[in-house]
Amino acid sequence: MTVDHWEALFNHKYLRWFNLNGLPALMEITRVEGHVPMRLPNGEKVAKPVIHLKQIQGKITDLKPLVLNVVNGNTISTIHGPAPSGWPEKQIVLFPDKTSVGGEMKNCIRIRAPKQQQEA
């Protein structure tokens, strides 16, 4: 599936909201990295955590690592515990959502527990 959004025209190294193709995706965490060096769009150099994933179900056609933000890190911690060393081989669901950035609503990726864990 080809993503028809202007942001997809750029070469992105990490997973973006449009890679989900508008649908949730069941994923398995395969690896967690801390302090990965990257450059923000404004040129600032930062180091951020990144999770590597394997798709179990979903429509992601260009699977890439996901930069972990605080909201999604807290969600994974709530689901699978606070130790990132215990996250590999655990499942999460990625889904497209919106968040407020500087008073403007922006597209983003959020995380939730798989259904079987939500029901437990």
Image (cartoon, rainbow, N blue to C red):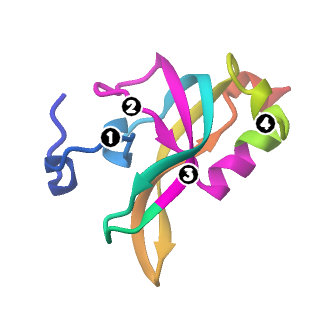
Find out whether the residues at labels 1 and 2 contact each other: C-beta distance under 8 Å: yes
**Residue at 35% from the left image edge and 25% from the top image edge:** 59
Q: Which of 60 and 14 is in front in this view?
A: 14
Find out whether the residues at labels 3 and 2 contact each other: C-beta distance under 8 Å: no
**Label 3, on which residue?**
48
Image coordinates for residue 87, horizontal then vertical, percent: 73, 27
The kind of residue on which mark 3 rests is Lys
- Look at the numbered disc 3 and give the secondary structure of its residue: strand
Local crowd size for mark 2, using a 10 Å CA cut-off: few (<14), some (14–19), many (≥20)? some
Q: Which circle's residue, 4 or 1, is located before the other in the chain?
A: 1
Image coordinates for residue 105, horizontal then vertical, percent: 42, 72
The kind of residue on which mark 1 rests is Lys
Q: Is residue 61 above or below residue 19?
A: above
**Residue at 78% from the left image edge and 42% from the top image edge:** 77
Cα separation between marks 4 and 3: 21 Å
Q: Nearer the viewer, residue 61 or 68?
A: 68
Q: Which of 68 and 106 is in front in this view?
A: 68
**Residue at 40% from the left image edge and 36% from the top image edge:** 23
**Label 2, on which residue?**
64
Image coordinates for residue 60, horizontal then vertical, percent: 35, 27
Q: In this view, does 105 lie above or below 32?
A: below
The kind of residue on which mark 4 rests is Ile
Image coordinates for residue 37, horizontal then vertical, percent: 48, 49
